[in-house]
Image (cartoon, rainbow, N blue to C red):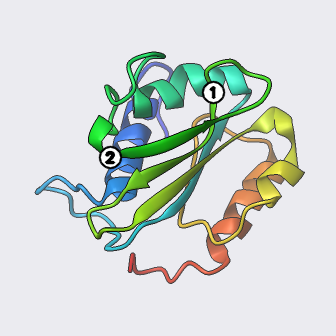
Amino acid sequence: MFAGNQEGKTECGAAEFAYHLTGLYPEWWTGLRFNRPVRAIYGSESGATTRDTAQVKLFGEEGQLGTGYLPKHTISGTINAKGTTGLYESATIKHVSGGESKLFQRSYDQGRKKWASLSNIDIAWPDEEPPWDIWEEMITRLNAGNDGNGG
């Protein structure tokens, strides 16, 4: 999505990510649907900006887990990241199919190699425009093993 500052890009990204992670699609949704759990990655410029923007929209404010786009009953677990207080490195999200989606967080300041450490990613969400080398890694992770039809 391309839009100006403060136009709701993070809000839209969080909503769509939650749909794919949980399989809880609104009735009106005509986009891609995953009928199975997904492996997903999201991030922004730093751990702090990722925590304070995308993570808050997905999970809710610190201490209020489940008040974002991911309902509390869908969050199986979170693992805290090292170095940034309150930031999740990964999370496990219940999918309506009965399985669990896996969500990974990375920040651009961690560098390309940290993004390259994951494989078979179904969806990726760069909340801010990433450096070119990280963009290439995201595209590579998406191309490796994605069946392209949501199922």
31 is higher (above) or lower (below) than 68: below
At label 2, which amino acid type do we have?
Thr
Give the percent coordinates (x, y) of residue 22: 33, 55
Give the mark nearer the N terminus: 1 vs 2: 2
Q: Residue 24 vs residue 40: left or right?
A: left
Q: Residue at horizontal 64%, vertical 22%?
A: 49
Crowding near the residue tagged with mark 1, few <14, some 14–19, many ≥20 C-alpha atoms within 10 Å: many
Q: Is residue 78 above or below residue 49?
A: below
Residue 51 location (% of width, % of height) = 59, 24
Most extreme residue toward the left is 27
Residue at image position (69%, 67%) is 141
Considering the image in quadrants, where does the C terminus appear?
bottom left
Q: Which residue is mark 1?
A: 87
Q: Nearer the viewer, residue 76 or 69?
A: 76
Residue at 42% over, 31% down: 59
* Location of residue 131 by image quarter: top right
Does dot 1 land on a helix, a strand or a loop? Answer: loop
Q: Residues within 10 Å of mark 2 (few under 14, many from 20)?
A: some
> At x 16% / y 52%, what residue is drawn?
26
How many marks the image carries: the answer is 2
Q: Nearer the viewer, residue 88 or 142?
A: 88
Corner quadrant of residue 36: bottom left
Residue 44 seen: yes
Q: Which residue is mark 2?
A: 74
In the shown orientation, is residue 58 left or right of residue 109? left
Q: The residue under label 1 is which amino acid type? A: Leu
Pinpoint residue 104: horizontal percent, then vertical percent: 62, 49
**Quadrant of the image occupied by residue 94:** bottom left
**Could you tell me residue 98's position as x and y percent?**
30, 68
Element type at marker 2?
A: helix
Q: CA distance from mark 1 to mark 2?
A: 18 Å
